Image (tube, grey):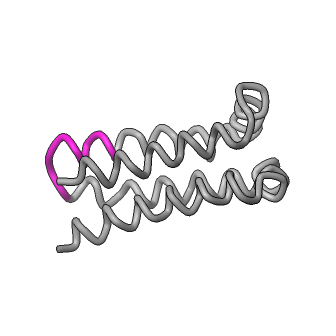
Amino acid sequence: MSESIYVYGVATFLLLSALCHFFWPSETQRWMSKPGVVRTAGGFLLLLAVPCLYWRGWYFWTLFGALIISGLWRLCFPRHSIRAQERSYPRWVHGCLLLGGALAVWALRP
């Protein structure tokens, strides 16, 4: 039961993040251009990864790896994270990636 709540929580977080990127791109750009906000997001992703250590299986290990890598990059190198995303693709593309992540977390759930 707690696994399902966790998975739906992660998927919902990713979906809400994607919707912010789609419908409020300028505000999202403004907020996610601040290193402090990016560090906070990275810390949140790291905290979100912790429950994956309790449960076993490929799903939770993969989710743990993805959250840890993303969280550490944002927490330890926020300016690099900001520059890489600004130069690589527009904000809506990041929204598509987040939406894809939300769908994958939901569709592949254990």
Q: Residue at x 43, y 52 (%)?
A: 102
Q: Judge from the rendering whether residue 88 lies leftward or rightward of residue 57; answer left or right.
A: right
The quadrant holding residue 10 is bottom left
Q: Judge from the rendering whether residue 87 lies leftward or rightward of residue 41; answer left or right.
A: right
Q: Position of residue 46 (x, y in %)?
A: 47, 53
The quadrant holding residue 24 is bottom right
Magenta region, mostly helix, strand or loop? helix
Q: Position of residue 109 (x, y in %)?
A: 23, 53
Up the image or down, 80 lies above or below 110; here it is: above
The answer to whether residue 92 is seen in the rendering is yes
Q: Residue at x 68, y 52 (%)?
A: 21
Q: Residue at x 52, y 41 (%)?
A: 70
Q: Position of residue 3 (x, y in %)?
A: 22, 66
Q: Nearer the viewer, residue 9 or 103?
A: 103
Q: How many marks on residues?
A: 0
Q: Position of residue 35 (x, y in %)?
A: 78, 49
Q: Is residue 23 magenta?
A: no
Q: Residue at x 47, y 38 (%)?
A: 69
Q: In the image as oriented, which residue stretches furthest toward the front?
A: 23
Q: Judge from the rendering whether residue 31 lies leftward or rightward of residue 13; answer left or right.
A: right
- Residue range of the region highlighted in magenta in the rendering: 55-63
Q: Nearer the viewer, residue 26 or 10?
A: 26
Location of the N terminus by quadrant is bottom left
The answer to whether residue 35 is seen in the rendering is no
Up the image or down, 77 lies above or below 98; here it is: above
